[in-house]
Image: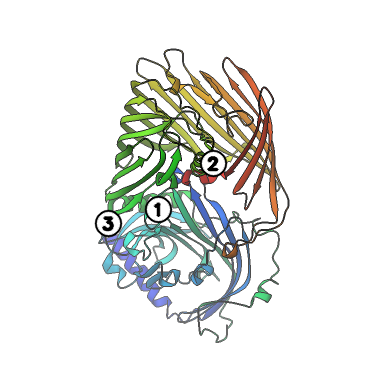
Amino acid sequence: MWNSAEARALAERATALRARQLADTGLVDYHATAHGYVTFLAQLGDGLREPPRIVRADQLALEVYWRAPNFSKQIIEGRRDTLLLPTDIVYHRDHLGIVQNNFPDAIRLGEGDEVRDVAHPLSRVGLTRYDFAIDDSLTIAPPPVRVYRVLVRPHDPAAAGIVGAIYIEPREGQVVRMVFSFTRRAFLQPEIEDISVALENALVDGRFWLPNRQEITIRRTGTWLDAPARGIIRARWEISNYVVNHGVGAFFGGPEIVSIDSTHLRQYPWHGGILDSLDLGTPVASATDLARIGDYARDYAIHHVQGTALAARSASDFVRVDRAEGLALGAGVSHRFGYGFSATVRGRYGFADHQAKGEGDLTWNWITLSAYRDYRDVGDLPEGSRLINSLAAQEFGADHTDPYDTRGFAASVSLPSIAGFDWRVGVRRERQDALAVRAHPTSGHFSPTVPAVSLWQTASSLSVSRPTSPGPLHTDIRLDASAIGVVNSFARADAVLSVERAEGVDRLVTRTTLAGVTAGPVPIQDDVFLGGPITGPGYAFHEFVGRAGASEHVEWQFPIPAPGITLGRYGTTPRTITLAPYAHVLYTSGSGWYPSVGLGVLSVFNLVRVDVARGLRRGVWTFGFDLDRGLWPVL
């Protein structure tokens, strides 16, 4: 129950203790050490379900000093970094240090650029602005201490404030842990999507609750674009080696967080590689606790967050080139109304076919209703990124898309994740028609489009996906599968399984695809199409068409020395490139097996890939150039 007498009394007791502790002569001073990482990560893909990729990692060692009543000094004694992808990010000073005293009464982050002067719930002002509710009681160890989990939220959902939980020891009102996010109004930069904070204290000398472990995560998206891309700054710290009430000197002037000179920074005695222990260490809170508080904060945001942004699933929603449309320009807009409701409208116009395409979606929580007219590609896997395909189509007539026309209505429901799998069911009613080649490339010529059968189709669908996550034998596994059932006609299913395993600096990469259609009158656009850089290197694009098909790709990636390339403010590329020899085989019903071999070369942070392959059964030499597949969703 919100604002019950017991919840208010507990919050007031903790607030009074915080105020007394700021002038507590029992704790005169302390010195401690802190070790941690500040990482910058990128997350891409529809739904942002794939794990974020590390772009840059900084490892830091701090000397932490504190003296009553509330003086703090943090000196960076050691710092080293590694650059895994190009970036020119510069961190705010307070990203490079720990949070003292569970934040002051006015919470600030990013030196006041990200969050400024948000009232702490356990402050004199905060008691008048927040609601409190005792959610649960539990024991936290070590040492074992019984705490109440107190949920907090602002009285006014539109006000700047925090949303989360404070874990309070009920007898004295000690704050043992805080896990929270912020309301939308608290963010001073429009690109900030979310900030989550987890602070945990430990009992020192049997008397003082002082910082122990901390994690702060700042997620950013585009300021004006609703696209599947996110940048993440994550700071994670462990604080130890406390020496209490032994004197710390009088050097608290100037900025709170400072660094020694770069020469002495490099001399810090690090052990092992910078990435060796990046994911190690005890979590600040249990996964269950973090998920619970995260869900609570998200539910609160869903009900109250509103806003408008340009809507695009990728850069190619703005501009693309293919043989059916020629040059096509598009745009879209999305608006969140609050309480889980949102609306999105997208459209584009092809200057060769003189046709408008578009889609309108209405979403309420997990339910989406759509009306659309769009060009859909046959095949179960894209054979390249949209960006590189547009360039190749425009200049050389090499278009690795095979579109047909669709227009209709659809409804879908996203189901809760079960055992790590995401589920989505839907139904659609649409008209399908063939398309003609309308564009003309700068050189070469386009192949004909697929001769799709004109028809009305009513179908139900089921899709199941497992984002990349740990599997057996130290592997990373991703699965994407879907099935459709067409009323009174046929059923179709496909699956893509990707498995990777690191072997030191080397990596084994495999990809398995399966697809099939039941017997019956199946239009050609629903057949299985294989051939091209992904499903059939060494063979022509969509050379193989049948009722069933499969492919298996196995490659071994290993680095070799190479010159580094300076990218200015974006850093210098690693002094290696990656070679990826591979073997591949595809199968289609009626045609049999078609093996091939090839070699990939990955460079520029492994973002650029060049392939050469040879089909071993009536195949040809093929050459390919593209960007890393992890970037395809936003290209």
Q: Please tell me whether residue 11 is drawn above or below residue 2 in the rendered image.
A: below
Residue 21 at x, y percent in the picture: 43, 76
Give the residue pinned by disc 1: 293
- Give neighbour class at mark 2: few <14, some 14-19, many 20+ (Cα, 10 Å): some
Kindly identify which numbered label has been placed on residue 2. Answer: 3
Considering depth in this image, is 196 or 580 the residue closer to the camera? Answer: 580
Left or right, 52 with respect to 148, comes to: right
Which is more foreground, mark 1 or mark 3? 1
Residue 632 visible within the image: yes
Q: Name the residue located 54 percent from the left edge and 45 percent from the top edge.
A: 630
Residue 540 at x, y percent in the picture: 59, 28
The amino acid beneath tag 1 is Ile
The amino acid beneath tag 3 is Trp
Give the residue pinned by disc 2: 468
The amino acid beneath tag 2 is Thr
> Going from the N terminus, do you reach mark 2 or mark 3 first?
3
Q: Name the residue located 64 percent from the left edge and 30 percent from the top edge.
A: 538
